[in-house]
Each structure stands twice: as structure tokens, then as C-alpha cells.
Image (tube, rainbow, N blue to C red):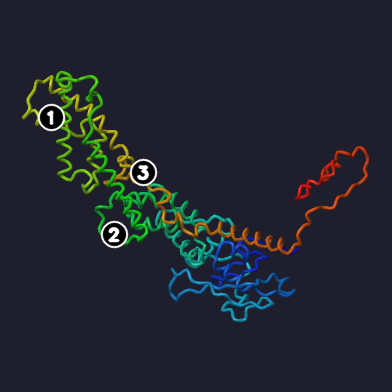
Amino acid sequence: MASLPTSDFPKFIDGDVLLIISTTQYYKLHSQVLQAHSPMFAQEMTTRPGPRLNAQARRENAAAYRFELVKKPGDDEDPGQFLRIDVNDNGRSPKSSASLGTLPDNNNGKPANIINQAWEWLFGIFYNREPTFDDSGLASVLACVMALIEVSESIGALEHVCDIVDLALMRQDTVLWSAVMGDPNVWIELGRRVRSPAIYREAAIHLVGQWDVLSEDKKSRIGADIREILQRKADELALAKEAIELRILGHYPQFMTRTASSKPGRPTYSADIYMWMCVSFFRQWFAQGISDDRTRRAPDGGLNFYAALHEGGGAYLTHMDFKTFHQFFPMSIKACHVLEANMGVLKEDIKQFVGDLMTERTHLKRAEHEIGWLTCAKIEKEDLPWANDVRGHRAQDGLEQVYAGMEAEQAMDHEQTPPRPKKRARMFVEEDEDEDDDEGMFVPQDGVDVMDEDGE
């Protein structure tokens, strides 16, 4: 007894669309699935519905639609375009360049190149089949996902592969983030293309941290919309750094302050003479750093300077610096120790001001990787270029259109229905005493109809 033919991807018995990639690679899929995932196919099938197949064609499970992929000659990287071939009521395509007889009656053979393989992945995704990429390295994964992006964009189905592409890249983990750090200009565009918040944010943070030292040529390679966002974030960071530096220069430890009600005198202030000397010494050092462009205007954006402030202790104004200071302002050994101890208290106070600047919001950390710029920029949801993209709301808009159409139909039906009379006809039915409770469901015992709109 002959076995029954199977109906599964890539060849469904009840599929009504034949998609021919090559003479050895074709698909028989469902028009509803293709229309739901591709605006291109939806446009083709709604504007020109397929023919009504005759009984013989239906028995043979013939397809009512036929599309053949046409590529540029000699260009294996071209995703191609689908050319629709007319089908008659017999399910035949007389003008087709590939006859049904040349197509294999079994599962597809191995695709000729990665673009053809990408079509296999894409159509499989339409049927919730996870693609199997070559994950031997970032380069191989990137080649696979770029091919998938190319073919999906050609039929308007990019939004259905974004999450899959994002996940495939994220599995590379440290390798991916190292590549993003090495060339954020390229990766920020890819992150936008596949709508990956993680990749986009990672690249954007690196670019904002280096924005002031990036050449105009590199900036010009970034899309105008993204460039505007990065410039705004860089300006926000520069303003934050300036405000922090002003706050540090105006800081006094809390215990140094006095209130007028306590009527402080010279002895009161003289008790804090060592801290006053530390404040003066620290401000001189800080002002020298600003003058030497070692703070926010430094090539590293002030990273080393702020890192020293955040570390405190012997990271700056060391014991050797105090020895130089004492050459001009000598004091006893005990006084030297007291002065340095007070400087330690002041340094602890200063740490809090640069905490936000030293926050690392990238996946790679400076403790394990050489990152010579600040990575504290906040990239919020509204900073994503596609946050307000119309395509992102396509599915929701489609549902709204369906609901709007249903409401319009109901409104038309309501207009065509004759108006209901204001008073409903009353009906009194004699029933047994056991059913007295049901009698009042629509007509109360007092004889007033609750459904009467006039309340009579």
C-alpha cells in the first residue's frame, strides 16, 4: 500500500501559493500566512486574486498563485524580486520559465548560496520554525543574519525577523560586545536596522563617550537622525560634567559650616584651620586640572580625572604632593599628618559627586577591557530611532482598521433597521403559582414595563 504524501513545510498539500527560488528549491505555502507576514504578497493577492480552480485542479492540489524569484545575473548577493506568473483555472502557468515537471517532488535540496538559504529561513519563520545559523563565530553568524535581513526587507517582512536576528547576535556575548566597541559606527546602524535595543544602546554609549574626538568623516557616516540623537546626548553629558565640576569647586565639608545663631568667633573657625588649608589646596589642584584640560575637555572626556576623584585615597594629591606643599608651608610632622588626614575626609566627600559619571552602562567593563572614554550615557526608549516608527505599529493599526470596519458595518446596519417603538407590547400569560417569580423578569407586577424608554 502506497504511503500517503506528507503535508509539511516546505511543501503543504493544501498550500495555494507556489514560490520558486530555483529549479531545485521551491515552496508550496498558504496565501493567508504570506499575506499576514509580507505587505508585498498581501498587495499582490488582494489587488489580483487568484483564479477559481476547476475540480481537476483542486483534486491535484494545484496552486492558485505562482511567484518566481528573479535575480540580477551573476550577483549571488542579490536577494532578487518575486515575479508573479499568471495561473489559469487548470492551475497551469503557460508563461512560466520553470515548468512543474522540472521541480522535484520531494523536499528541497541544499540551497545554492546563502541568499537562497535565507529564503528557506524566512519562510520557515513564517511557520514558527527557528532558523539554524552557522554560529561557529561572529563573522559567520553576521553573514547569516545579514542575508536574512536582505531577503526579509525585499518583501517587507523585516519586523518578523528582528527578534530572531537580535537573539542570534546576542548569543555571541563578549565577542559581540567587543566588536561593537571596536566599530560602533557600523553597529549602531545595524542595531537600528534590526531594531535591537541592546546593540543600538551599546554602540550609542560608546559613540557618546567619544563624540568630541570623533572625526567629522566618521560622524558623517552615521544616519542624520541617529547623529542628531548622539549630538543631543553628548551635549547633555557635557552639561552634566560642567555642573558637577562647579559643584565640586563650591563644596565645603558639612562640619565646617556655622550658623549665625551660634555667634561664631575666631576661635571657632581656627579649630578647622587644617580643613580650610585642605580646601584651598584641593581647589588649587582642581583649577590647575581645568586649566590643563584634564577634566571635561580632555581627549578622554575627563575619564582619568573623574576616575581619580571617584577612587580617592592615593589616586591624587599623594604624599609626594604634600611634601612639595610643605616646602612652601612647612609644619611639624604631627601637623603634616593631621593635614593629610583632613584631605582624606575631603576626598571622601568628593566621591559622591562623580558617582554617576563613573557608572558603566555597557556590557564590557573597564576592569577587564581597555575602554578609554566615559560609558555613563543613558539611552532611553525615546532615544531609539524606531520608537515612533509607523511600521512598529503596523499590526496594531491593522487591528484598528478591522475594528473600525466592523463598527462602520454595524452603524450601517443600525441605520437600515427601522426604529424600535417607544412602547413595547405587553403580554400577560397565565402561569402556575410556582412560576410567579419569573413573571416579573420583563413585566413588573405593578404593570409598568421596565423596557419602556419613556418610563411609563
The residue under the point 7% across, 27% down is 329
Instruction: Quadrant for the N terminus, please.
Output: bottom right
> Are the residues at dot 2 and dot 1 in contact (C-beta closer than 8 Å)?
no
| Residue 230 on image: x %, y % | 33, 53
Whether residue 134 sits left or right of residue 442 in the image: it is left
Q: Distance between the residues labelled 2 and 1?
A: 44 Å
> Are the residues at dot 3 and dot 1 in contact (C-beta closer than 8 Å)?
no
Whether residue 121 sits left or right of residue 314 in the image: it is right
Residue hosting label 3: 361
Give neighbour class at mark 1: few <14, some 14-19, many 20+ (Cα, 10 Å). Answer: some
| Residue 263 on image: x %, y % | 20, 20
Residue hosting label 1: 322
Q: Is residue 242 above or below residue 35?
A: above
Q: Mark 1 or mark 3, which is nearer the start of the sequence?
A: 1
Task: Indicate the quadrant where residue 45 lies.
Answer: bottom right
- Give residue 218's mark: 2
Q: How far apart are marks 3 and 2 (CA)?
A: 23 Å
Task: Indicate the quadrant where residue 400 lies.
Answer: bottom right
Q: What element carries label 1?
A: helix
The residue under the point 15% across, 29% down is 319
- Label tally: 3
| Residue 260 on image: x %, y % | 23, 23
Q: Mark 2 or mark 3, which is nearer the start of the sequence?
A: 2
> Are the residues at dot 3 and dot 2 in contact (C-beta closer than 8 Å)?
no
| Residue 249 on image: x %, y % | 21, 36
**Identity, as a three-letter code, of the amino acid under mark 1:** Phe
Q: What element carries label 3?
A: loop
Q: What element carries label 2?
A: helix
The residue under the point 51% across, 64% down is 156
**Identity, as a three-letter code, of the amino acid under mark 3:** Arg
